[in-house]
Image (cartoon, coloured by chain):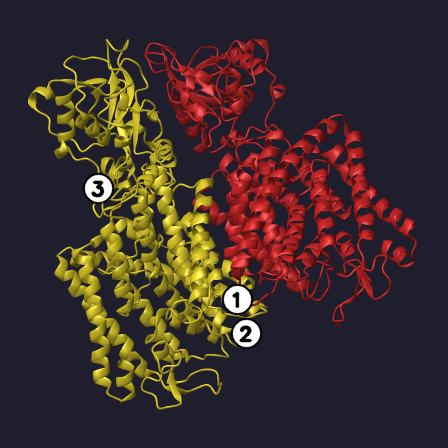
Chain colours: A red, B yellow
Amino acid sequence: MTTTLMTQHRYVEAFVAYAGINVVLAAAAAALCAFIAPAAAGSGIPEVKAYLNGVDAHSILAPSTLFVKIFGSVLGVSAGFVVGKEGPMVHTGACIANLLGQGGSRKYGLTWNWLRYFKNDRDRRDMITCGAAAGVAAAFRAPVGGVLFALEEAASWWRSALLWRTFFTTAVVAIVLRAAIQFCATGKCGLFGEGGLIMYDVGSSKVTYSAGDVLAAILLGVIGGVLGSVYNYLVDKVVRTYSIINEKGAVFKIILVVTIALLTSCCFYFLPWIATCKPCPTNESVICPSVDESGEYKSFQCKPGYYNDLASLFLNTNDDAIRNLFSSRITKEFHISSLFIYFGTIFFLGIATYGIAVPSGLFIPVILAGAAYGRLVGRLFEPIVKLDTGLFALLGAASFLGGTMRMTVSICVILLELTNDLLLLPLVMLVLLISKSVADGFNKGVYDQILKIKGLPYMESHAEPYMRTLAARDVVSGPLVTFSGIEKVGNILHALETTGHNGFPVIDEPPFSDAAELCGLVLRSHLLVLLKGKNFTKDRLFMGRSISKRISALDFAKAGSGKGMKLEDLDINEEEKNMYVDLHPITNASPYTVLETMSLAKAAILFRQLGLRHMCVVPKSQGRPPVVGILTRHDFMPEHILGLYPGINPHKED
Amino acid sequence: MTTTLMTQHRYVEAFVAYAGINVVLAAAAAALCAFIAPAAAGSGIPEVKAYLNGVDAHSILAPSTLFVKIFGSVLGVSAGFVVGKEGPMVHTGACIANLLGQGGSRKYGLTWNWLRYFKNDRDRRDMITCGAAAGVAAAFRAPVGGVLFALEEAASWWRSALLWRTFFTTAVVAIVLRAAIQFCATGKCGLFGEGGLIMYDVGSSKVTYSAGDVLAAILLGVIGGVLGSVYNYLVDKVVRTYSIINEKGAVFKIILVVTIALLTSCCFYFLPWIATCKPCPTNESVICPSVDESGEYKSFQCKPGYYNDLASLFLNTNDDAIRNLFSSRITKEFHISSLFIYFGTIFFLGIATYGIAVPSGLFIPVILAGAAYGRLVGRLFEPIVKLDTGLFALLGAASFLGGTMRMTVSICVILLELTNDLLLLPLVMLVLLISKSVADGFNKGVYDQILKIKGLPYMESHAEPYMRTLAARDVVSGPLVTFSGIEKVGNILHALETTGHNGFPVIDEPPFSDAAELCGLVLRSHLLVLLKGKNFTKDRLFMGRSISKRISALDFAKAGSGKGMKLEDLDINEEEKNMYVDLHPITNASPYTVLETMSLAKAAILFRQLGLRHMCVVPKSQGRPPVVGILTRHDFMPEHILGLYPGINPHKED
């Protein structure tokens, strides 16, 4: 419609139509996010990363999040925001995997019995890793890139079986995609399937490069590193500001989204007026100026036979904008000023857009901005380089991706799979290495920053230096609640009510053992199931390893997040509270333990490497209670430790 | 020379010349291996894998091994064996990394001071992982494949920093290779650099495939899986047989090598006689029959204008043979019978060659055999397939690699980097998945089998099911030797002399503590350095945390394998033996411990995941000595456990 109005020179009406549609779409996306699933806002990759690190935050992967992520992302991208669909697709993949992994959704009536095999932490995590890999594989049509993304960015624990499982998943994605593309090749499915499995074929059959090219690539790497860290810094500030606004309520969220949508529309509509019209290429095979929405040569305000190069970038789908930037010099030429304006706009709009209440991926804005300055650098270095400017756009995208996200191998492979140009590999690697190294000197990767803003207790794989000066017992906090092997029901209920602990040590005492000794660890969820079964006795009796028939082993399987049994579900009367229950059948008799004098750094590594949730601290000297305390994820967080010991300098190297 | 004799129809002399040269080269390679470094025989990948798993076997990565590996591999490949250079290049990379990682070689006068930072287990392992990755990257000109190989096959522990380091290493390899190729493009370096970074450009610009192609690919996957497991089974038997022969002495080794060299020469020379001569293609651009050694169309016994297709495969370099097999139908046609003969010969010669005393990689034989049957299947399915037979050769190579080596992602990426054909990706993934799944149903990967034959104590990343029924204390073996915090020198010497233990628990006793408690763990190597320093006292005195100035902290750094201090280096007289030494300064006060009742499976996972060498088992009940035993890698080996408990069925699932 806007195009029609433009050709009729009804410019104000064209803008109103353009901005109006964008605002309506944006408001719809924001309403979905604000009212149904606030967790669906943003990229989703940090949340998936946190989940795979062992953070069981509620609603990260809930079915409602999945729903909003899919439709919110569609609406958000349609609204013309500078956002990508890649991050949301990773989150979508993880949500679907989670839905399968917890045996379907009882709430929505989608359950399968065979899915119960995934009802444990590890297999569910594997499943979600595969889901994330499938998301990347589908988003970029890059199956190997998906595997590497899951390995490099998403997963916290890696094992050989997981590699093979993610590979299997992305292979299926590749085969299905391939079949869909072949099916759609005849044009049955609209825009889907254009370009085959390789989305942007930069197509230069013989790549040779000179010292000038290498120099330009090094420069691009440095620029990417600097810009990437600036980008991360600004995103951090903006997200913190937005979260203050967003906390005020759903209406404020929607107002913020609408404001940004208007800002984006204004930029996209008014900036192309700066650009001068260029005559269409004389080549017969291109349609110029293009008549439909997805064309490469937008006429905009130009007279027939001319096109506006800035409009071709701004008023286009993201995919086509990338294709334009990656195209070779012969097929498409951009003004240097157009590239500069485009880069600046996308850079700042990308920053301003992240953090609003719509699903918003970071890949596309980063690739667009990177490709723009890459092409710019290619143009400026024209006298000394041999490579095509389209290839410099690719290198620019690589450098900015490396500078913001700090991934190396996965970005490298994704870009190669996107563009089908293996001969450029050495240069892409060089650019990525430089940009990552430069940016790492300033701050952390964008996903790590977002994790921190969201307050998710992510555990790093290495111990901090100051942890070496502390012992495990130094950070044990709070009163320790322990149970006897055969415990009074009332005591258990009281402990469950008054504490929020998820694990309790069980201690065997005389007459059931010679001296007080650690029997093991019992989980809150298992206690709830046991109490629900009401297999109580009047006296302190040892019942052995068997539990009542009223409870099956399957009841103890890990429930979906937010779906476990609640304390309120129990109905225990006063008489029962004075009875006893044998905890031995549900006690994990082999909890991982550390001596209280163990270096905190080593305890942290043990905790992290084995993916624990609870770790018992046992005394070193004899004649004391058999357990000193319990360490959980929160006890290893720098905030907790530095709160206990304000005197420690966290940046001092030992 | 052989070619000249052939053109003169002096066939017997030609054979004598051909076989003679091969035998001489083979004998030289065997002599190097047998007399200088027996560890250099074979592929080297299993050894590197074992080292990275924590097996510090002497001489695996010694400088002498490096020397023999390089020259032996050159001689072995030149001798016409069905062996590859890829495995040896991985081993070579690892050896060079080890040389750097242990601060150079004092024996050969190659030392650098800054290299001392690598003098610890973890950094040295990282270095060697990078070396292995560089080996693959250089061998296949596949930098990303190198990273993935290191991840999937070589490394036992993986962390983000390592990914980034291997990526850096292979990026440097790629850049250096690229520069060398550009430098050599003018023909200055002989055969090196031919074909650019992509070695075998299968070059089909537009790949589309039908259901028939997918069917053929599935069949190839199944064939690859079955043949791969048969290959592994036969390699296992052959290597076991050869090792009996090889154990008899160096001369027997050389005789075995010469026998196989003769067998290979006979096969390669006499089998082409079976093939019928084919007329040369009419295409002007090819030289047919070729006159030099590396041509694609060998004349052999044919009259001018004709060529022998079997000779083009047999009497060629491995690289050219692969290029021939991967070439498209239009440029090169093979008889079905020729392909069948070639496949059978390479398959069985490959099996017969592995295990003899020359450096011998497995990649090339497997790729050759796989490509041969892939092309064969492509020919047989010609009526229903759309893909080129050259691409089927590629799929065949993928299937056989997957069936023998059981890698997925790395083989996939290596093949793609070798052939620059990303559009074939979905089919390659499909083939690899099927072949690996099928083969895994029969036996283990070839490298795992070789590891087992060599008796290297490789620790799997998962615990065996029967370990769940045992506790940590059940497998503690041998008398426990402990030291007091301040121990008599004579006692230490006696313990070092009479046991082979590498770690000893240190126990603090009254009056230095209230009760006997575990102080920590002390290493044999550190004890030797401490005793060498002779910082003894007449009485049992606590000397605090400082050690004598005679010993610097650097002396305790991990020495190169086989280069640490020996017991014989000590010179301690009778008087000194009655003196005391304070062990506290060199005691690791935070050893990882497990309770004696800890499930053996969980203890094994702790040991493996954290990459430990010693683990202290502490008592659960009080009033007993503070340490029950020490577990080392050998205590977790199935042979050890099943030896202690012959009643356990290792295959029973709990």
Q: Nearer the viewer, residue A231 or B66?
A: A231
Mark 3 falls on what kind of element? loop
- Percent of width and height locating residue B548: 23, 22
Q: Are marks 2 and 1 in contact (CB under 8 Å)?
A: yes
What amino acid is labelled 2 in the image?
Ile
What amino acid is labelled 3 in the image?
Gly
- Percent of width and height locating residue B266: 24, 76
Side (left or right) of A121 relative to A508: right
Q: CA distance from mark 2 to mark 1?
A: 9 Å
Image quarter hosting the N terminus of chain A:
bottom right
Q: Residue at x 15, y 65 (%)?
A: B255
Q: Are marks 3 and 1 in contact (CB under 8 Å)?
A: no
Q: Which residue is mark 1?
A: B215
Q: Nearer the viewer, residue A497 or B307?
A: B307
- Percent of width and height locating residue B587: 28, 23
Q: Which residue is mark 3?
A: B562
Q: Residues within 10 Å of mark 3 (few under 14, many from 20)?
A: few
Q: Nearer the viewer, mark 3 or mark 2?
A: 3
Q: Earlier in the sequence, mark 3 or mark 2?
A: 2
Q: Earlier in the sequence, mark 3 or mark 1?
A: 1
> Which chain hosts label 3?
B
> Which chain hosts label 2?
B
Side (left or right) of A185 relative to A638: right
Q: Earlier in the sequence, mark 2 or mark 1?
A: 1
Q: Residue at x 36, y 29 (%)?
A: B599
Numbered label attached to residue B384: 2
